[in-house]
Amino acid sequence: MTQSAPRPLDGITVVSLEHAIAAPFCTRQLADLGARVIKIERPGSGDFARGYDQRVAGLASHFVWTNRSKQSLTLDLKQAEADGILHGLLAKADVLVQNLAPGAAARMGLSFEALHARYPRLIVCDISGYGEGGPYEKKKAYDLLIQSEGGFLSVTGGPGEEQMAKAGCSVADIAAGMYAYTGVLSALLLRDRTGVGSRIDVSMLESLVEWMGYPMYYAYDGAPPPPRAGASHSTIYPYGPFPTGDGGTIMLGLQNEREWQVFCEQVLLDPALASDPRFSANFRRSEHREVLRQIIVDGFATLSLDEVVARLEAAQIANARVNDMHGVWQHPQLAARDRWRQVDSPSGALPSLLPPGRNSAFTPRMDPVPGLGEHSAVILEELGFSRDDQARLAAAGVV
């Protein structure tokens, strides 16, 4: 396998009217597979995620994560001359992805119906908080709000109402971005059969609710929902974090009665515990989890984290260390599998994780994170704009 091996989306052009996370995460996956992604940004400020923080050598962490391998074109879509530039791009594009405010794309003449009449092969992917139609269609949506509406907060965090917790990453945005990504891939396959493009309508709410299938069915037909259990499992026990004697934390994952027996015999060194009637089945262990937790904590109190891990591994009991972000950067498995690459950026070379799903036939594209408007001149030149034209457009604030 060589770097020059063809990638699945070589020759595919994506135009993206994107900001924040959901759409940029979608289009970065497309760029990883070889697509040319032209990211249209507001002159002067760009994607507002560029300003979230300055944690990556002066660049924003969200932006670095979701925008490598793209081209940045600045364009003020509210100005009349921008329309011709945008449609010049769409005429040659395969995909349009947008997550503008609800209704904004349609007001600019960028609804699927209007675009399909002009560019029948164009695939249009619209990403929004709640999807088209329904009483929430125009409601503003951010990741935390969707976590709330989608029931995620009701099952995440500690047992009390005041202990509910959001996910530590943008889980609703990520879910929507991934469904948009797979939707675009499906639409490209469909176009190969039919010759015409189609529309993908991705809702953040629906994306996250799909991921909530287990707790929803657990609470089917009015049954009590799974209780919030912090980092532990709400219905399986022992399944969660436990302290070790040296101040470390081990994450246990026991799934069946055979593992429970082995855990008592080989890890806690207390074979009789396995037959204790309070703990003789998972539902009983879950009912008596506070008592069992103290027994496990006492058993680990004289052991270091490494010693606990050694016992668990010898017993073939699933376990994990509770890493912080520094631990993940240094994770030995990621290093052993050679998962890190360097990508360029306006602040210099940065480490970047290869996309999951290693394919034997090609290497993912890992090109620079773009500066704001870095590729405007190149793209405008391709559309036939001279340097004088470009200077005039820049002076007028169009680009």
Image (spheres, grey):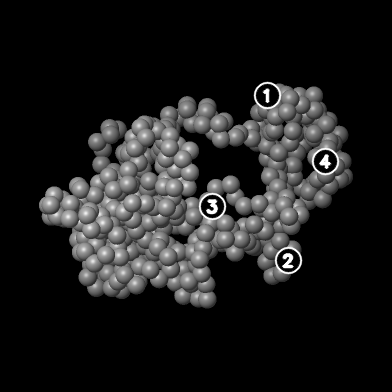
Q: Residue 235's x, y, as percent? A: 73, 51
**Label 1 belongs to which residue?**
306
**Label 2 belongs to which residue?**
223
- Mark 2–mark 3 distance (CA, rounded to whole Å): 26 Å
Q: Residue 102's x, y, as percent? A: 43, 68
- Mark 2–mark 1 distance (CA, rounded to whole Å): 41 Å
Query: For residue 206, which numbered disc appears in the image?
Result: none
Q: Earlier in the sequence, mark 2 or mark 4?
A: 2
Q: Is residue 286 above or below residue 259?
A: below
Residue at x-position 49% and y-position 64%: 129
Q: Residue 329's x, y, as percent? A: 51, 31
Q: Earlier in the sequence, mark 4 or mark 3?
A: 3
Q: Amino acid at mark 2?
A: Ala
Q: Amino acid at mark 1?
A: Asp
For residue 14, say whether it is visible: no
Asked if marks 2 and 1 touch (Cβ < 8 Å), the reply is no
